[in-house]
Image: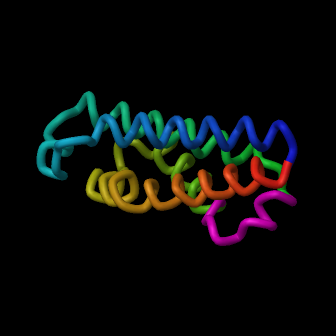
Amino acid sequence: MTKRDRTILNKIVHEAAVIAEMLNGIDETVFSGNEEKMRAVCMALINIGELVKNLNREFRLEHKQIPWKDMAGFRDVAAHGYFTIRMPDVWLYAATELPLYAEQIKEILTREEETQ
């Protein structure tokens, strides 16, 4: 893993933590009724997708268990289709899938630190 990839992964984990904090203590109904939260989560997802696009291809291929392409693709949908994006999909992704990917990324970072 390059230093650049490590930096990007740490930023992805940070963005995921920001999303988790924004969603802490609320359910999908509250989320869907809060324009500010919806926009903020979408912006953080855009940030994550952009970060993923900057990871080295080799790194992404080494860690195929994480759906990098889907993460980057979600960015494209959120950035270019805000008026057509389905908030239930955003909720599902942000509340259930992204936390799993963030944990996997943390494990990669931990393993990397242990081998240094």
Q: Is 68 above or below relative to 8?
A: below
Q: Nearer the viewer, residue 22 or 34?
A: 22
Residue beneath the point at 67% across and 51% down: 110
Q: Residue furthest bottom?
A: 65
Measuring from the top left, give residue 11's x and y in whole percent: 62, 35
In the rendered picture of this protein, how many numbered marks are placed on residues? 0
Q: Viewed as shown, does residue 101 lie left or right of 69?
A: left
Name the outermost residue toward the top. Answer: 36
Question: Is residue 65 located in the magenta-colored stretch of the structure?
Answer: yes
Give the image location of residue 77, x and y in percent. Answer: 50, 50
Looking at the image, which residue is at 73% across and 35% down? 7
| Residue sitting at x 26%, y 57% | 88
Viewer-nearest residue: 16 or 103: 103
Q: Residue 57 sits in which quadrant?
A: bottom right
* Model colouring: rainbow
**Magenta residue check for 40:** no
Q: Vertical placement of 12 versus 90: above or below?
A: above
Q: Could you say where residue 114 lies in the image, as x and y percent from the top left?
A: 76, 52
Question: Picture coordinates of residue 37 (x, y %)?
Answer: 27, 33
**In-image side of 58 versus 86 (left or right):** right
Residue at left offset 58%, top offset 62% = 70
Region rendered in magenta: 58-68
